[in-house]
Image (cartoon, coloured by chain):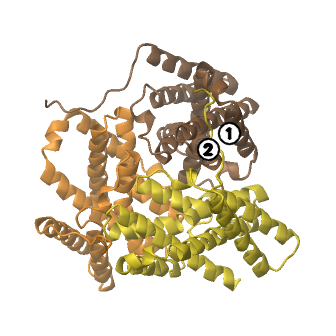
Chain colours: A brown, B orange, C yellow
Amino acid sequence: MEMIYILDLLGVFVFAISGTLSASNKQFDLFGAMFTAFITALGGGTIRDLVLGCTPVIWATDMTYLYIITAAVALTFLFKDYIMGLKKTLFLFDTIGIGVFTIIGMQKSLALGFNPVISIMMGVASAVMGGVLRDTFVNDIPLIFRKEIYATACIVGALLFLLLSFLNVNADASLLLTIVLIISIRLIAIKFKLRLPVITSRQP
Amino acid sequence: MEMIYILDLLGVFVFAISGTLSASNKQFDLFGAMFTAFITALGGGTIRDLVLGCTPVIWATDMTYLYIITAAVALTFLFKDYIMGLKKTLFLFDTIGIGVFTIIGMQKSLALGFNPVISIMMGVASAVMGGVLRDTFVNDIPLIFRKEIYATACIVGALLFLLLSFLNVNADASLLLTIVLIISIRLIAIKFKLRLPVITSRQP
Amino acid sequence: MEMIYILDLLGVFVFAISGTLSASNKQFDLFGAMFTAFITALGGGTIRDLVLGCTPVIWATDMTYLYIITAAVALTFLFKDYIMGLKKTLFLFDTIGIGVFTIIGMQKSLALGFNPVISIMMGVASAVMGGVLRDTFVNDIPLIFRKEIYATACIVGALLFLLLSFLNVNADASLLLTIVLIISIRLIAIKFKLRLPVITSRQP
């Protein structure tokens, strides 16, 4: 499927920008920025591939990923202020990214014969582990653990994609529907300030 | 060996509770709690399997682990105050957990033909890496690096188990003796406030 | 090549000392120091091997690495003040270490058929990931992301080594020339306070 590959590269590109911006906030130099961009964009997929036993990992054999990340770092380096102003566009692309990463991770796991629950989990891990590793390496608490509905949107999207596959819906159509659903969930969550419950003590 | 599997699940359950409590202290939401519980319970075994080249990792093919962790998170979410009161029980189960994880990790490594020193190391890694990763992701310094005798208890237990194996003692009996030894070491360490030496400067 | 193995062990030894000193600064106990030394010395090579699919990792089958690290921790424990005084020697050995780790990582990747760009990346990862993991586990921001020219020296060294290989220069001579180049770059960078550019906002 050609479309999913293009969207995958788009996701990698936006995740790399997000990593570069994090690095920039911490005053990292160009190497630190490149490292953080790389971890953010490819960390999730790498962990998925390691756990499933799919080595060497994909970016070690398809150089396109590395070129895309290098381009993202260079562009952020040159046009940081302009890119920072594109909040809405970045949000949109980021959400497309997590949607595509979820689906790719899930498809890969299903194709390898893992059951649907593990496959959804691997899909979500592909989507969120990059951001978790980014925050851990720049020494922040991972945002996703307390942010608005993010992983949840991936999980719901993964369930829809799985359902559409069982119904033999065309793959490109399933992909688009799933991404639209994930974007909708995130927009609704932000608009209504929805978040998952926090475990708290009932004691005062 | 049936008993070791049951104790393994018990260990996973208690480690998952400990991860959920950590997540709760940091105000993580339900997804963050599930993530932290998972890393705490299965992080050590996952790293061991990756390093030894045993992929896919065990929890990707045996769903029981995922169910146990989900149950631990749900119970902690519902009954946090009650569970927090069970300090002694949690300590006991946690110690059983590290004992069992150590033995499983060591047995697996030995069975794969690794030498005893590496096998002990892999056993200890199985037991302690989950907690190290938990603390790293919630952005704390890993407790185990400065806490009372913890890894040391695992190492001594591993040595006993190895000795009993060479003496052809029945596996279940070895398992019980090892766990009793590890629990005893930890209790004695806490009672007498024993800890490993710290590397310090002699200069003022 | 015998010489590269000896230099590799020297690198492991110095990296283990650096890990032990980090652990000591954070008041870790002996186990914490051993863990940190191990991660610092072998973390980079381990990640490289996992990503390339070369498991079990090298230190699980060659016990020499573990002995060297144990010796480094013990010596640092006993003679910390003396070792702290050897700043220049440690700097020299550390630079030899990153040079050798870069070359070993690159050679291994090339031998496995990966392309030169990925191989250089794997070389650099072997050299720097140990330090990144060390800083992450002791809960600091990885130094290398903002420090003087460090990874850059590895990259330039890797390029030279690659060039010399294509020119069929003798392997030991290439190794020496590369290490001399890396040491020179670091010395010059420190002398002239060179560092990579930081991504900053142009807004006030």
Q: Locate residue C91, reporting x and y percent.
A: 56, 71
Residue at image position (61%, 48%) is: A35
Task: Name the residue at the right extreme.
Answer: C167
Q: Residues within 10 Å of mark 2 (few under 14, many from 20)?
A: many
Picture layout, residue A52 above or below residue C98: above
The image quadrant of residue A198 is top left
Provide the residue designation for mark 2. A33
Provide the residue designation for mark 1. A73
Question: On the rendered structure, is C199 left or right of C83?
Answer: right
Along the line of sight, the residue nearer the viewer: A115 or B59: B59
Residue at image position (35%, 60%) is: C26
Residue C42: give its label. none
Respond whether the residues carrying marks 1 and 2 are from the same subunit: yes
Q: Residues within 10 Å of mark 1 (few under 14, many from 20)?
A: many
Question: On the rendered structure, is A117 left or right of C116?
Answer: left
Question: On the rendered structure, is A198 left or right of C92?
Answer: left
Picture layout, residue A191 above or below residue B189: above
Residue at image position (45%, 67%) is: C19
Residue at image position (39%, 34%) is: B31
Q: Inspect this view and state whether residue A52 appears.
A: yes
Residue type, mark 2 in image: Ala
Q: Inspect this view and state whether residue C12 appears.
A: no
Label 1–label 2 contact, CB within 8 A: yes
Looking at the rendered image, the quarter that the N terminus of chain C falls into is: bottom right
- Say how many tags the image has: 2
